[in-house]
Image (spheres, grey):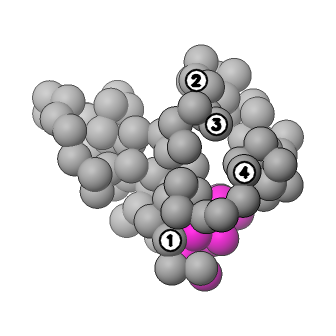
Amino acid sequence: MKSITADRNNIASCGLYCGACRKFLSEKCPGCKNNEKASWCKIRQCCISKGYRTCAECERDVRECKIYSNFISKVFALLFNSDRPACI
């Protein structure tokens, strides 16, 4: 398994750090940025369409964004025990 290293390229569109994920470190997942199978992620789609690396580049507050603060994203935040808006 890889060790955790700081790398901006491993930051997902939503602000989570893929470089600390167990699946990423064990090379079972390419991370959100390079994962074409992650086309279901509306946050990722939004960032790609606007040319942003992450939501942090957007002028909108993520807490008010309906794409970022939706039911699925709140479930992910609960599952990963993360304060996702704080990541942005």
Numbered disc in front, either 3 or 2:
3
User: Is 76 positioned to the left or the right of 33 in the image?
Assistant: right
For the point 52% across and 36% down, which residue is it? 87
For the point 57% across and 49% down, which residue is it? 14
Give amino acid for label 3: Pro
Residues in magenta? 38-49
The residue that mark 4 highlights is 61
Disc number placed over residue 39 in the picture, else none: none
Local SS, label 2: loop
Give amino acid for label 2: Ser
Work out whether residue 9 or residue 27 is closer to the camera in this orientation and state it.
9
The residue that mark 1 highlights is 52
Q: Is residue 5 magenta?
A: no
Q: Nearer the N terminus, badge 2 or badge 4?
A: 4
Question: In x, y percent, where is residue 83?
Answer: 61, 25
Does any portion of residue 8 appear in the rendered image?
A: yes
Numbered disc in front, either 2 or 4:
4
Q: Nearer the N terminus, badge 1 or badge 3?
A: 1
Give amino acid for label 4: Asp
For the point 17% across and 35% down, which residue is it? 5
Work out whether residue 40 or residue 18 is closer to the camera in this orientation and state it.
18
Does any portion of residue 1 appear in the rendered image?
A: no
Disc number placed over residue 85 in the picture, else none: 3
How far is disc 4 from disc 3 in space, using C-alphas? 9 Å
